[in-house]
Image (cartoon, rainbow, N blue to C red):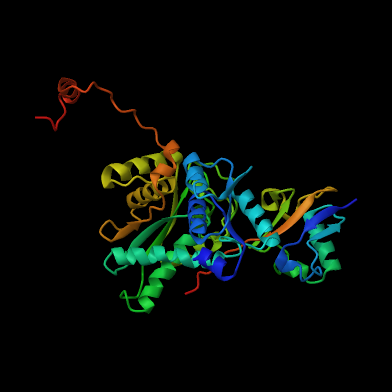
Amino acid sequence: MAVNKALEFKLEAVGCASTGNLANSVAANAAAAGLPSFILIPDSLEQNKIIATSIYGANLIAVRGNYDDVNRLCSQIADRHPWGFVNVNLRPYYAEGSKTFGFEIAEQLGWKVPDSIIVPMAGGALISKINKGLHELERIGLIDGPVSTRFYGAQAAGCNPIVAAVKRGSIDIRPVKPNTIARSLAIGNPADGYYAAGFIMKSGGTAEDVTDQEIRDGIQLLAETEGIFTETAGGVSVGVTQKLVQQGKIDRKGITVIAITGNGLKTPEAVQLQAPQVIDAKIDAFEELVKGAAYVA
Amino acid sequence: MSLKVVIPAPLRKHTGGAEIVEIDAGNVQEVIDKLDARFPGIRSSVCDDSGSLRRFINIYVDGEDVRFLENLNTPTRDGVEVAIIPAISGGCGL
């Protein structure tokens, strides 16, 4: 949506500050629209996210520092150049685009709304935009109201300014310096944190955080039980869901949606897996390998 | 001897369009006071009624957010860059 608006406004280029996933999206959509793109990322970003941006021919610039440093620089660039930065001067359109996440949830549930949604939070915009999407579907009659979904925010313990605010019962965000493997969520001064914290509490939900090891465990659990390989942000969502269920804050009998917002191939560094066992191309070698396994007759 | 204040586009209506303003000041509070003396009205855009930094305004001294330093009491030596940068957010209304 933001790139289409950039075309409509006759902007000369598009760009974004990104922890990786937005970078991939903006670069791809700019390529399809025939616009040059300037993508600014923290210099510590995972290699696969860099590949998945560079491939589209984007001008990819790694900035020394964290996302908050990148975001500050993008605000200054957007001030000087006739370019559209999707999460700066095109932010209203970019944010509206996030509503489609809410549309897809309702559609995939057969035009129903869930009782609970667990959403990973970086800048904090997605959680309230999902709610906006659900309410718009109610307004046009595609789903029955009133929407009473409880929203639960998820962050890494190493970057948890919104969770900390909710736990204090406050909407005042105290910025932090991120230190987590969940780099896609590593925004220490979240622009929409104030709205996210207020909205979570108003919905009757809450917020929780997980350690880096709990993130890895969440990635593994989702893969082994649902067949879905997620990147670190999804590991945060799964880990937080586990915690909230154990704390009795999420009703086990209700419909619960866990927002998995990225593919695991983007952050393979986060998981440590065993190398495959190597055998000769002989049936005896295979039989020897699987001997004693419960599923072998 | 002075320091350089970077004014964001939304506040340049106060500075006659100037992006960079040079000022003498010993800390961030003094920067705001002196800016407002020269360009009346700029303080209320940056600070709330209690004098605290507004929620969606960030001030950086040589690239560091003053919220990680001493907020409005953060010292500003000569030659530093003080950047005022509004955060862009919102759009939650139904």
Question: Which quadrant of the view contains residue A135?
Answer: bottom left
Q: Residue B69: horizontal and vertical position, in percent? A: 70, 48
Position of A87 with respect to B2 (left or right) is left
Q: Nearer the viewer, residue A195 or A282?
A: A282
Considering only vertical position in the picture, is A175 above or below A194?
Answer: above
Considering only vertical position in the picture, is A39 above or below B8?
Answer: above
Q: Residue A176: horizontal and vertical position, in percent? A: 59, 48
Position of B58 with respect to B28 (left or right) is left
Q: Nearer the viewer, residue A171 or A290?
A: A290
Residue at 28 percent across and 61 percent down: it is: A255
Q: Residue furthest bottom?
A: A140
Q: Residue A37: horizontal and vertical position, in percent? A: 57, 55
Residue at 33 percent across and 52 percent down: it is: A245
Residue A50 in view:
yes
Q: Nearer the viewer, residue A145 or B6?
A: B6
Considering only vertical position in the picture, is A269 above or below A93?
Answer: above
Q: How many marks?
A: 0
